[in-house]
Image (cartoon, rainbow, N blue to C red):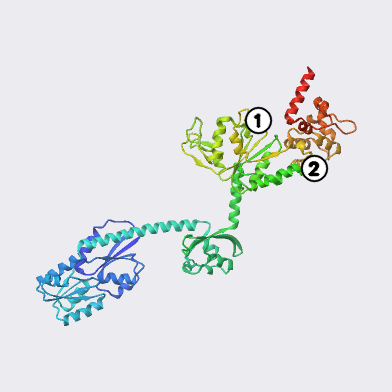
Amino acid sequence: MVRIRVFIPHLELKEIFEDVVAGLPRYDNVQVETVYIFGTPDVLSRDCDAEILVARGMTHDVLQERFPQKHVVQIQLNSFDIFDALVACREMGAKKIALFLHNVEIRCLESLEELCGAALQLYDAPDEKAVEAAICQAVEEGADTFVGAGTMCGICDRRGLRRVHIHTKHDAVEAAMQEALNAARTINLERTRSEIINIMLNHNEDGIIAIDEKAHILAINNQAYRIFQLSTVGELIGRPASELIASEEWRQLAEGGAWREQILSLHEQKYYVQYKPLNEVEAGAGALIFIKDADRIMEEESRIRRDLVEKGLTAKYSFRDILGHSDAIRDNIRMAERYSKVNSNVLIIGETGTGKELFAHSIHQMSKRSRQPFVALNCAALPENLLESELFGYEAGAFSGAVKGGKMGLFELAHKGTIFLDEIGEIPIALQAKLLRVLQEKEIRRIGSTSVHPVDVRVISATNINIEEKIKEGQFRSDLYYRLNLLDIYIPPLRERKEDIQELVDAYLARFACEMEKSIPTVTPGAARILQDHSWHGNVRELRNICERLIVLNDAHTISEDLLRQLKIFQSKAIPAGGTRTEDAGDDSVYERLKPKKKKKDLAEELGVSRTTLWRMAKRQKELEEK
């Protein structure tokens, strides 16, 4: 509620003032009251509960001086009001007129004397005492008619002097009251805004302090009140912020001039404190200090990470999860760690089961994007139409069966993070052009949409096929390949790094034994040789599955050769009585005829073909021999 108090300077004006007030529009949050005050008595200095004061003449001047924090509206006295009073003096036959004004300049005094047909003397009257002194002086100087406002008229009436009241017109009072109403509405609006801001600040879980350019407190919210264990908030306004706590770090931060953040210990508890200047361009404009509970920040971060895990939008593995100490796998890890430090796209090449996804997760975990989403998609798992909607999303009504309200695509979900596209070589040729545009322009267009959305996403892709061969066959775009293959990693198959097999077997046997609440078995030398000599076409994934199966089947403390022979994949391997076995290559006649003592890898290099081509040659040779 805003109160407007209107001061009536003379009873002759009471009717005009009350008439204007009665005609004002009514507002529930504005109250108007009138009061008759003669002159400038001491009562004007008393506490006034009204926010807006309306007055005329010297009453206005006194109120403005004594209440500088309030809005004081002046009822203006115009030249026509003075002229009317002087004309009235002429009709009364005045010979010498004493004109009482304050802060009003009269330049055409001679013209006014001619107008009223009398001599005219001006007297400055800032307050009631000055008016009384001026009246006495005017009497001594022979004035027979006095012209002025309400205070002068009242004094003249007591002394029996002839006077003429300078009347205030209805329009002047109405203009002043309209200004007062506008001011009241502005005050109410600012109060509402201030209340909303206070509610927002006091419902904020962080402590917030506003300080001026001298580091004195302008405002402080309830949370800061509790953090600093203060007895009262009001007494702090205008005090130096450095007084809140006896800490040199706090004093330096509170009196700082640039943006800063640091961890501070306040009352034996850790807080994350941010100092943000209100105007970074112009120094010395004050600042806001945000005080956040460090424990709550960690709890929120933990909750966000749990939510991301539930949605599958976070990396699960790191380089610590990649087992093996062979030169090949260690070189790969070192290379991937270097790739983690940049934002370039990565293509991971390797046979199925070699651990391509582990490398993708680990690169994201070690990158600057680790706190952002990690989104994975197998491009071979969905048909073309579903794959496009999964990657880029769609608008409401884009196609039959679309979710109401549309759907955000994986690229949008991965914004600021990483998207992992597994089996990238299987992406349909028609969809490759759209993917290329996303990589080039860094923006996506949902299915059925006419607008684009900017995205900042790092792409890690993986494949187990020879994409260069697909490019030659016209099934993969070369420009897309070069966009994806800015950085590449080739993960060798397990048969090329057999020194890692023992470590992998030990780790997986221990893991599955603990999960199934069994004792961890050891592997006999004969069984170890069988595992070491196996070709592992399924690579690490196949070895992992075999270890899990062995734990399920085994109830002893060892893994023996007999237990391995029960598994189908080892039944076709001839185990000589001496406990040793021939090279895998010895089973294929093409290898025996060409160079029987060489491994498939060495033989393929000599022939200048890939191992896949060599395998096809062996298969063709076998078919010819059978015919």
Left/right of residue 245 with respect to residue 351 in the rendered view: left
Which residue is labeled 2 in the image? 520
Can residue 24 be seen in the rendering of this structure? Answer: yes
Residue occupying image coordinates x 58% and y 54%: 297
| Quadrant where the image shows the C terminus | top right
Q: Position of residue 355 (x, y in %)?
A: 70, 39
Tag 1 or tag 2, which sits nearer the N-term?
Answer: 1
x then y, percent, for residue 472: 63, 29
Instruction: Choose between 496 and 142: the one closer to the eye.
Output: 496
Residue farthest to the bottom? 140
Q: Which residue is mark 1?
A: 469
Disc 1 crowd rating (10 Å Cα; few below 14, some 14-19, many 20+) is few
Which amino acid type is marked by label 2? Ile
Q: CA distance from mark 2 to mark 1?
A: 45 Å
Q: Give, as a three-letter code, the residue at label 1.
A: Glu
**Horizontal and vertical percent position of residue 259:** 53, 60
The residue under the point 81% across, 25% down is 589
Q: Secondary structure at mark 1?
A: helix
- Report x, y in % for residue 105: 22, 71
Q: Identify which residue is drawn at 68% across, 39% down.
A: 356
